[in-house]
Image (spheres, rainbow, N blue to C red):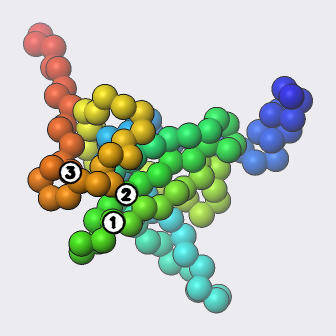
Amino acid sequence: MNRIKELEKKLNPVKEWPSFQAGDTISVTYKIIEGTKERLQTFTGVVIQRRGTGTTETFTIRKMSGNVGVERIFPFASPILDTIEVNKRGRVRRARIFYLRSLTGKASRIQEKKRFVAEA
């Protein structure tokens, strides 16, 4: 089993991305190929889960587009990913926040983590 994981790492290396977890609001910029043209598109939303390890690790982002919830699953090792930017750190008590799907409006807001600044 270890040998298989070593081969996966060599064949499909995973880039270094900023650390984030469920509840964080992130912006993912990814490449879209349309015929011979290539362009970048940004998807901004709340991370509702991370799953898997190594080359099979994925994360799911949810955003509201009008009154419709849109979710997108991104693999960490995908070559279409260009950048991942953490916009806001959220404070949640679960690793998978699927309850967000049933909430709308102000109820679906996630509290922001407070940062502690040490005084010098």
Q: Who's the residue at 29% across and 54% down the image?
A: 102
Residue at the extreme front: 102
Label 1: which residue? 69
- Is residue 31 rendered to the left or right of residue 22? right
Count the marks.
3
- Pointer 3 and pointer 1: residues touching (CB < 8 Å)? no
- Position of the N terminus, as image quadrant, is top right
- Is residue 4 rendered to the left or right of residue 57? right
Label 3: which residue? 108
- Pointer 2 and pointer 1: residues touching (CB < 8 Å)? yes
| Cα distance in 3D space between marks 3 and 1 | 11 Å
Q: Who's the residue at 47% across and 52% down the image?
A: 60
Circle nearer the N terminus (2, 1): 2
The answer, for residue 8, to whether it is visible in the render is yes
Label 2: which residue? 62
Circle nearer the N terminus (3, 1): 1
* Mark 3 crowd level (few <14, some 14–19, many ≥20, 10 Å Cα): few
Q: Is residue 74 above or below residue 119?
A: below
- Is residue 20 rendered to the left or right of residue 37? left
Amino acid type of disc 1? Gly
Q: Who's the residue at 47% across and 72% down the image?
A: 40
